[in-house]
Image (cartoon, coloured by chain):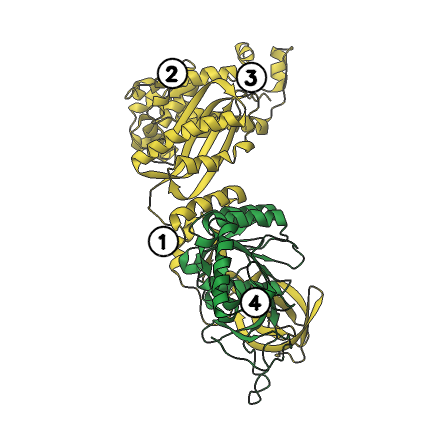
Chain colours: A green, B yellow
Amino acid sequence: MATLVRLGGGKKDAALAALRATLRRLEGPGRAAAGVVPTGFDAIDRVLPDGGLARGALHEIVGEGADRAAASGFVIRLLLGLAAQGPVLWCLADPELYGPGLQRLGLAPDRLILARTRRDADLLWAMEEGLKTPGLAAVLGEPQKLDLTASRRLQLAAESVGGLGLVLRPADGGKATAAVTRWRVASAPSAAPGPDMPRDFGLMRGRWQVSLERCRGAAPIGEQGYGSWWVEEDDATRAVAVAADLGDRSGPSAPAIRHAG
Amino acid sequence: MLAAVDPAAALVGLAPGMSLADARARLPELRLVDADPAGDAKALAEFADWCGRFSPWTSVDGADGIWLDITGCVPLAESEAALVRDLVDRAARLGFTARAAVADTAGAAWALARYGGGPVCVLAGGEARAALAPLPVAGLRLPAAIVQDLKRLGLKRIGDLYGMARAPLAPRFGELVARRLDQALGLLDEPISPRQPIVPRLVRRILAEPISTPDAIEHGLTQLMALLCRQLEEEGLGARRLELACFRVDARVERIAIGTSQPSHEPAHLGRLMTEKIGQIAPGFGIELLQLRALAVEPLAARQLGLDAQKADGTVAPLVDRLANRLGAGNVLRLVPENSHLPERAARAVSMLDTRHDAKRLQDWPAGRPRPIRLLAYPDPIEVMAPVPDDPPLMFRWRRVPHRVRRAEGPERIALEWWREPAAGTDGIRDYYRVEDEAGRRFWLYRRGLYRPETPPAWFLHGFFA
């Protein structure tokens, strides 16, 4: 695949896109028709094969320990544009999602249906039921572990009615899964205050490092996977924007921040 | 002391309340069984449950009685008399000697069942006055002391009271005697069931052969569900709660119930919810009667699911029901705002099936100050290094992992509402800080109470930002 990308010219791009579309049609019924959900980050959408997260598919987001909040924050931003399309089913062991915080990010809490499950088996069952139900904007789950069989079931359920499945899981919670994309989200130190700001200025804009580790139907960029980005929140709009491409992983002090949104 | 006697003992003059020595003197070969009031109460409750096959409304009355409201239930049998005779016969087969009476009023039925002639007594409308006249005044459900007093006055029969002026009775007995009399005669309304005249949304199927396999139960259920749903549909109603009662040949009753988030009369949907619970039924030696009953109904489309009205609701409601059915209604939740300063009380996750919170949706979520997206229901105590009392911590240890605070913002002082009692040893004040650790993770920490030099301050981690 990597070779193909290097060949890239206008005509070949079009031919490739057509080929990819054909392949996806062959991959499974429903997928091609289900459409995509733009992530809202232009830089990231450009990497994704159809310019967004595919509907009728399962996507994994890996976030660990205290970074689970960072990962859920990333997911919530993905949901912002979606929640208008229907309710969101969120399956989790502990309904610690906090309404006022969600509201502040712009996700109306009454868009959520929370399913509290004690065991992964129940959680995966609930997700599957949700994915088979048309009319939901997305189905989210936070299992402890996700194996190949379970993820395949979810993927099939998502394909059946074009649902969007999102799994939020710890890093050791699964190796090979049938998810179409895998993301890793971690908190990142915010930028240093400017020289003209007082030392105790307080918190700067929150930042995360988002990496796309796996993406069916796209070509990896280098050895890093498919791309890695700094994402930064915007206090005023509460929206987030890709602050910088993290091609070289130069670390948190990367100075060049381009506000893209 | 004797608590109860059987018919044979009663023949030789033994009666409840007699001392044991007296009883032994009269009948040396007397066989004694310890009284077991708790066991009796349990058996009575089970029996009342069993009576559910005759009426959806049954309740235990005292230590030895059961009320059945059979309003509207007679079509299920042939006549009132047939229904009651069936009840007494079946009870006899279970080893119970039952006496039953049917009357217009609860009071008359009570008196006739206990003091009337035969084991079965059915009063036609308007006969109560004549039928009650020869019965003892004890039949009016009066305390023993009042019964004694009445007897002393020569008022032994209920009929003796008919001609009495009310005024002289009242100072002596209170208004209880007059009220009970009026209730028995139907002059005063006495609702015994909490409901309005019952239209039992109930269908039943008597099985020729007792069944015990899940398939057979499901088959019976499917037929009943179709019947009930047709009935509901004609009335423009949908069920919110349904119960399937399986009456076993050994007189036990197995029940399963389902709830829905929206009224429904879809046999397929309701049947699917119910079928998932059939496994919970222990059929024992077999089930002889299946009874499906709508415990709660609502006009269709009277209310929307706790989500904005939209086209998707129609498909989401069955999903909510399925989830609630397997996970439990208390585990399918939505978030509602609450009126409280305390962060953990400002929002609550409530069952989607609980309609009491519908109005809260209209209430606004608090806006303004930054709030975490995940909040611990119980704040976690943390060890903290804070240089100055009013400063945010420099470092804290949460679940044994140290976090160095890189930046912080605060404090935001949140005080307990004045009408709430602060926990012992605290003054109900929390100073909240938003902090970012070296890795960029953002936490919501607070110090409990105002700083006091003599006591080390207690710190907690309460939530996570993202």
Side of B406 relative to A239 (left or right): right
Distance CA(mark 4)–CA(mark 2): 87 Å
- Which amino acid, mark 4? Val
Distance CA(mark 3)–CA(mark 1): 67 Å
Distance CA(mark 3)–CA(mark 4): 98 Å
Q: x and y percent of residue B116 in the render?
A: 40, 17
Q: Which residue is mark 2?
A: B82
Do circles 3 and 4 both sit on a common chain?
no
Q: Is residue A179 above or below residue B164?
A: below
Dot 4: chain letter: A
Dot 2: chain letter: B
Disc ID at residue B5: 3
Q: For the residues carrying marks 3 and 1, which lies nearer the camera in this image? A: 1
Answer whether labels 3 and 2 touch (C-beta < 8 Å). no
Q: Which residue is mark 4?
A: A5
Distance CA(mark 3)–CA(mark 2): 29 Å
> Secondary structure under badge 4?
helix
- Which amino acid, mark 2? Ala
Name which of mark 3 and mark 1 comes first in the sequence.
Answer: 3
- Say which quadrant the C terminus of chain B sits in: bottom right
Which quadrant holds residue B183?
top left
Q: Would residue B249 be seen by someone viewing this image from the given angle? A: yes
- Say which quadrant the N terminus of chain B sits in: top right
Dot 1: chain letter: B
